[in-house]
């Protein structure tokens, strides 16, 4: 009897080991699911003090009258009670994971108190009771120098400590819009290397740990390896804010399809010609005519895009998500930006409007859900 039991036991163990071996050598293991985190740039220019007629630099007469189709459903101002809470709800419900706030260290400006209004939106976001529905990160947009570098470092590191600050691999993500001006303002490549090293050390000293620093860039046809200087300076990844110039075919009106082509060109040119990881940006439009008319001294483009629909924006986002998945080894953190949540003055927005309703965010919600399921 004992011999029969032993034989049966050996057969049983052999079967288990054989099954385990087969599972371990499965030639077609399940594919790892790639989820793309879609975010949008947020421009905080909609809470400056108004003049007697209710206008501000950004809420300008031509924008309000001739381009009123861009007005958000809550109005032009972002600082009215409840507006930030509503915006967060709209963005999160649309499937967006984060906002990238345009952020300004203004201490070098003579009108710094006025310009600090550009950071009001971030303050309102952090006070909102539903802020944890979205993560956030910073895009430094003002030129800096050695005179205010430590201020910039200290101010931004405090934001990194927020529980909903965007991280990749547990490391906070920080970006610079005007990267070349940062390098020149700090005194060139060697001094930039030292400045970035000091930024990282300050983050460690303040208990944040390691940080990831990004450089906003653009394709340069005459110099495809243009971005190599950012590697030398110590930046960790690249991104773009918008790629309107890359889709321009002519002065005046350009079809939105040209912007789609320009976006894809930027994605491929930058990611191919630099070893740094890259975050792609999907454009929703571009048209600075209202601000160009009201502010003749403002540097403005001589072109714009038309024939933009919510469905086309959604399908373009689908292209961006699939590009990010197809280039996951190069796509930084599987992140993707959209230009923009509220660049209504520049002609790129997702905000629900009084004319179009929620069509744009409805379209991207559908695409994000389908592509990340």
Image (cartoon, rainbow, N blue to C red):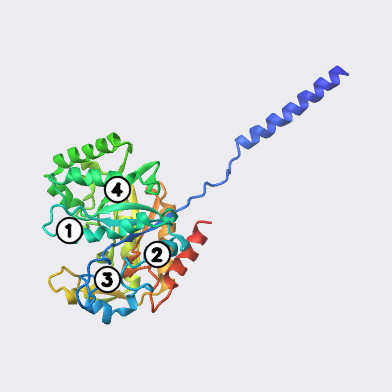
Task: Using residue 145 as the reference point, say whether residue 269 is left or right of it.
Answer: right
The earlier-in-sequence mark between 1 and 2 is 2
Neighbor class of circle 2 (other Cα within 10 Å; few <14, some 14-19, many 20+) is some
Q: Viewer-proximal residue, 218 or 139?
A: 139
Give percent across and percent down for residue 345.
Answer: 27, 71
Q: Report the residue marked by disc 2.
A: 87
Q: Nearer the viewer, mark 1 or mark 2?
A: 1
Are the residues tagged 1 and 2 within 8 Å (C-beta)? no
Neighbor class of circle 1 (other Cα within 10 Å; few <14, some 14-19, many 20+) is few
Helix, strand or loop at label 4? It is strand
Q: Viewer-proximal residue, 26 or 158?
A: 158
Neighbor class of circle 4 (other Cα within 10 Å; few <14, some 14-19, many 20+) is many
Determine the residue positioned at 13% across, 56% down. 109
Q: Report the residue marked by disc 3.
A: 345
Q: Nearer the viewer, mark 1 or mark 4?
A: 1
Q: Report the residue marked by disc 4.
A: 174
Vertical order, 371 against 144 (above or below): below
Distance between mark 1 and mark 4 Cα atoms: 24 Å
């Amino acid at each position: 009897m004992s011999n029969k039991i032993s034989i049966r036991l050996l057969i049983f163990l052999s079967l288990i080991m054989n099954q385990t071996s087969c599972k371990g050598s499965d030639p077609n293991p399940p594919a790892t699911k790639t989820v793309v985190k879609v975010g949008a740039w947020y421009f905080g220019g909609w809470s400056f003090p108004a003049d007697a007629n209710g206008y501000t630099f950004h809420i300008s007469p031509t924008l309000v009258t001739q381009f009123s189709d861009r007005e958000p459903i809550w109005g032009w101002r972002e600082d009215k009670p409840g507006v930030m809470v509503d915006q967060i709800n709209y963005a999160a419900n649309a499937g967006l994971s984060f906002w990238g706030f345009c952020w300004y260290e203004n201490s070098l400006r003579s009108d710094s108190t006025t310009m600090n209004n550009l950071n009001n939106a971030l303050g309102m976001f952090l006070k909102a009771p539903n802020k944890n529905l979205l993560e956030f990160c910073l895009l430094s947009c003002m030129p800096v120098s050695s005179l205010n570098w430590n201020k910039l470092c200290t101010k931004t590191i405090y934001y990194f400590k927020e529980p909903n600050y965007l991280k990749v691999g547990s490391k906070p993500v920080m970006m610079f819009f005007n990267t070349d001006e940062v390098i020149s303002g700090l005194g060139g490549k060697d001094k930039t290397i030292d400045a970035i090293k000091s930024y990282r050390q300050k983050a460690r000293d303040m208990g944040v740990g390691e940080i990831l620093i990004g450089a906003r860039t653009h394709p340069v046809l005459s110099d495809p390896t243009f971005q190599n200087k950012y590697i030398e300076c110590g930046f960790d990844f690249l991104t773009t804010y918008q790629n309107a110039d890359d889709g321009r075919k002519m002065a005046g009106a350009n079809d939105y399809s040209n912007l789609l082509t320009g976006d894809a060109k930027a994605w491929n040119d930058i990611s191919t010609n630099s070893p740094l990881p890259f975050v792609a940006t999907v454009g929703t439009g571009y048209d600075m005519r209202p601000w160009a008319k009201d502010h003749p001294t403002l540097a403005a483009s001589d072109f714009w895009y038309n024939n933009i629909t919510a469905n086309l924006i959604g399908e373009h986002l689908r292209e961006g998500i699939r590009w990010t998945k197809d280039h996951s080894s190069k796509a930084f953190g599987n992140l993707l930006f959209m230009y923009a949540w509220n660049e209504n003055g520049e002609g790129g927005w997702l905000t629900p409007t009084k004319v179009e309703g929620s069509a744009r965010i409805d379209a991207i919600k559908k695409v994000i859900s389908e592509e990340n399921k």
